[in-house]
Image: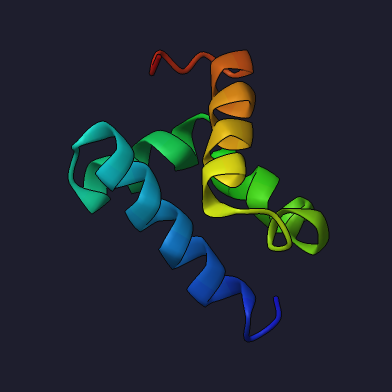
Amino acid sequence: MSKYEIPFLTACIQAFARRFNITRQAAFRYLHEHKGLAFLLEYYDVEHLQSMEETIDDLLIVCKKNGGAFA
């Protein structure tokens, strides 16, 4: 893991929490449980170049495919 991935993951978790008005802890649990964090790490090279809005949209798609329920 590079030194840039942790701040990126943190920013994504915070943005996800803000978008759905949930706590950062709840966002972390949801993203971890539905493989969103694994997706961000695997595709960091692409995802960190997109806007945060696009990254969150991608996370929603991945998490829904893995049983997530956010709209």
Quarter of the image with the N terminus in it: bottom right
Residue 1 higher or lower than 24, as above or below = below
At 51% from the left edge and 62% from the top edge, which residue is drawn? 9
Residue 11 percent location from the top left of the image: 43, 64
Q: Locate residue 29 relative to residue 54 in the image: left or right.
A: left
Can residue 44 be seen?
Answer: yes
Residue 33 higher or lower than 40, as above or below = above
Scheme of image coloration? rainbow
Q: Quick one: 2 or 16, which is closer to the camera? A: 16
At 57% from the left edge and 32% from the top edge, which residue is drawn? 57
Residue 53 percent location from the top left of the image: 52, 44
Residue 56 higher or lower than 13, as above or below = above
Answer with the quarter of the image where residue 29 lies. top left
Residue 33 higher or lower than 41, as above or below = above
Residue 66 percent location from the top left of the image: 59, 19
Residue sitting farthest toward the bottom: 3
Residue 34 percent location from the top left of the image: 52, 29
Can residue 35 be seen?
Answer: no
Quarter of the image with the C terminus in it: top left
Q: Locate residue 48 relative to residue 28 in the image: left or right.
A: right
Q: How many marks do you count on the picture?
A: 0
Answer with the quarter of the image where residue 46 lies. bottom right
At 68% from the left edge and 44% from the top edge, which residue is drawn? 39
